[in-house]
Amino acid sequence: MDDILLTKYLLNETNEAESASVRAWIAAHPDHARRYEHLQRIWKTSKSLGSQLTVDEEEAWHRFVQRRDSGATSRKGGNVRWINGLRYAAALILLPLTVWALYTFWNSRYGDSTPIVYETKEATHTDTLTDGSIITLNSFATLRYAQETRTHRRLATLDEGEVFFKVKSDPDRPFIVQSGEVTVTVLGTSFHVKRNGDQTEVIVESGHVKVTGPKREVELSLGGKLLINTTTHQFEVGKVTDQLHNYYVDNQFVAVNTPLWRLAEVLSQAYHTDIRIENPEIRNLPITTTFRRDDLDRILEVIGVTLRIEVKREGDKILLR
């Protein structure tokens, strides 16, 4: 789809036939809808910039009027209308120019591949990026991806949530994941990145990655785990002790001699609920089993029978005793 036609449609300047063509193109594929949504975000940004420019515009006109009045007699009526007309015309010119400047800047960086936005709500989602890499987004995740023509990078920006990456190898085009102030650089590997506010977690499934954060850089290989807090600049490097972090990729919970507290923690995250262990004596009870990611009540029933503990719901909480 022609970018100029998309811009015209966004500004309501298309005729009926052009509008129908754009609407059909948007509905034809999810990537088309994402591209149009991206253009809408540029437009919204331009409008906010336009509102900021209004302050300078008002000040400039005020100075102009002062200079005019200091050297000439005041002429009202027609001049006021003429000035207001000029200001209105300037506004009409400034906003489209702002949009065009933003769009030109974006294209100069990303070229023909404008960023595509991947977003999930309650359900997980697996997709293939334009470079052939595969991503799986956990629920409530937002990821933007583009191939930069200027830097030859493949750039994925994680705004929130958790994503599993299986990156297609390409030594000439490094794959970059940006999570706030944390940068993960890879050539070809599979790994998880989870962002929660100022905290980013990276787990490597295969190959190795380089993670750059505030004031420090760490390399991780198979089984490596890194937790970074960009506010405190704290780095915690370790090894994964289970495979429960894969639950949203494989749609199953694999517990191998896993302490109950850890399984409860992951189930709470996966089902967006609050599971609490009230009895400290059962926190570390080990459990070995595999659950499909199905009904939570069924999973809790099996846990209760297996470990001989009580499972009780109280309001929006689930208590293990």
Image: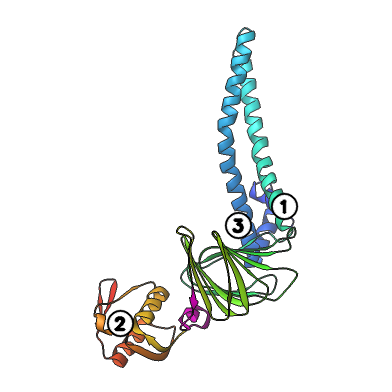
Which three-letter amino acid code belongs to the residue tagged 3? Glu
Q: CA distance from mark 3 to mark 2?
A: 46 Å
Q: How is the image coloured?
A: rainbow
**Location of residue 214 with respect to 218 vertically, above or below:** above
Task: Quickly name the residue at label 1.
Answer: 5
Mark 3 or 2 closer to N-term? 3
Marks 3/1 in contact by CB < 8 Å: the verdict is no
Instruction: Give the labeled residue for mark 3.
Output: 37
Q: Please say whether residue 49 is visible from this viewpoint.
A: yes
Task: Sort mark 1 into few (<14), some (14-19) or many (20+) by Cα contacts within 10 Å.
Answer: some
User: In terms of secondary structure, where does tag 3 sit?
Assistant: helix
Residue at the spot x=61%, y=73% of the render?
A: 209
Q: Which mark's residue is nearer the viewer, 3 or 2?
A: 2
**Picture quarter with the N terminus:** bottom right
Give me the residue at 65% from left, 35% from top.
92
The label on residue 295 is: none
What is the quadrant of residue 131 in the picture? Answer: bottom right
- The residue identified by callout 2 is 283
Q: Is residue 148 above or below residue 136?
A: above
| Residues shaded magenta | 237-251
Q: Nearer the viewer, residue 316 or 303?
A: 303
Image coordinates for residue 139, horizontal then vertical, percent:
48, 71
Coordinates of residue 216 in the picture (x, y in percent): 56, 63
CB contact under 8 Å: marks 2 and 1: no
Label 2: how many Cα within 10 Å (few below 14, some 14–19, many 20+): some
Q: Is 70 left, or right, of 320 in this rendering?
A: right
The residue lying toward the viewer, choosing from 246 and 93, is 246
- The Cα–Cα distance between marks 2 and 1, rounded to whole angstroms, is 61 Å
Amino acid on which disc 1 is placed: Leu
Q: Is residue 240 magenta?
A: yes
What whole-number distance in Å separates the C-alpha atoms at marks 3 and 1?
15 Å
